[in-house]
Amino acid sequence: MQRRRFKQTTPVDQRLEEQSKRLPEEAQGTPPGVEREKLIRKARQTETAAHIQEWFSSPGLQPPK
């Protein structure tokens, strides 16, 4: 069995930024419940991932504050 591979057209930092903006807006339109909590959690995770990605790509690799 072969894995399906495809080349991403946008950089990872741009995709993370787009998701971290889209998910909270999507969560606001969702009624309170499990699905909304999942969206909020995913939004926080993508925001954290974006910060980590920014830290990795920084020239000095300073530890997070």
Image (cartoon, rainbow, N blue to C red):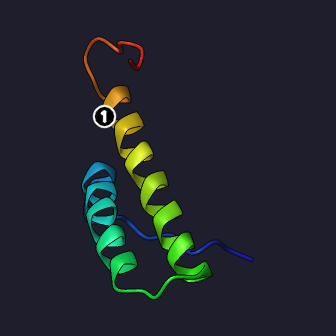
Q: 10 Å neighbourhood of mark 1: few (<14), some, or many (≥20)? A: few
Amino acid under disc 1 = Glu
Nearer the observer, 1 or 50: 50
| Residue pictured at 38% horizontal, 49% vertical | 47
| Left or right for 10, reference 37 | left
The outermost residue toward the right is 1
Measured as percent of width and height from the top left, residue 18 is found at: 26, 63
Of 65 and 63, nearer the camera is: 65
Q: Quadrant of residue 9?
A: bottom left
Q: Secondary structure at mark 1?
A: helix
Residue 29 lies, in percent from the top left, at: 34, 85
Q: Nearer the viewer, residue 45 or 5?
A: 45
In the picture, the quarter occupied by the C terminus is: top left
Relative height, residue 46 to residue 28 (above, below): above
Q: Residue at x 41, y 35 (%)?
A: 52
Give the residue at x 34% y 56%.
16
Give the residue pinned by disc 1.
54
Q: Quadrant of the N terminus?
A: bottom right
Residue 54 in the image, given as x and y percentages of width and height? 31, 34
Residue 7, by quadrant, is bottom left
Q: Taking 54 as reference, is 20 above or below it?
A: below
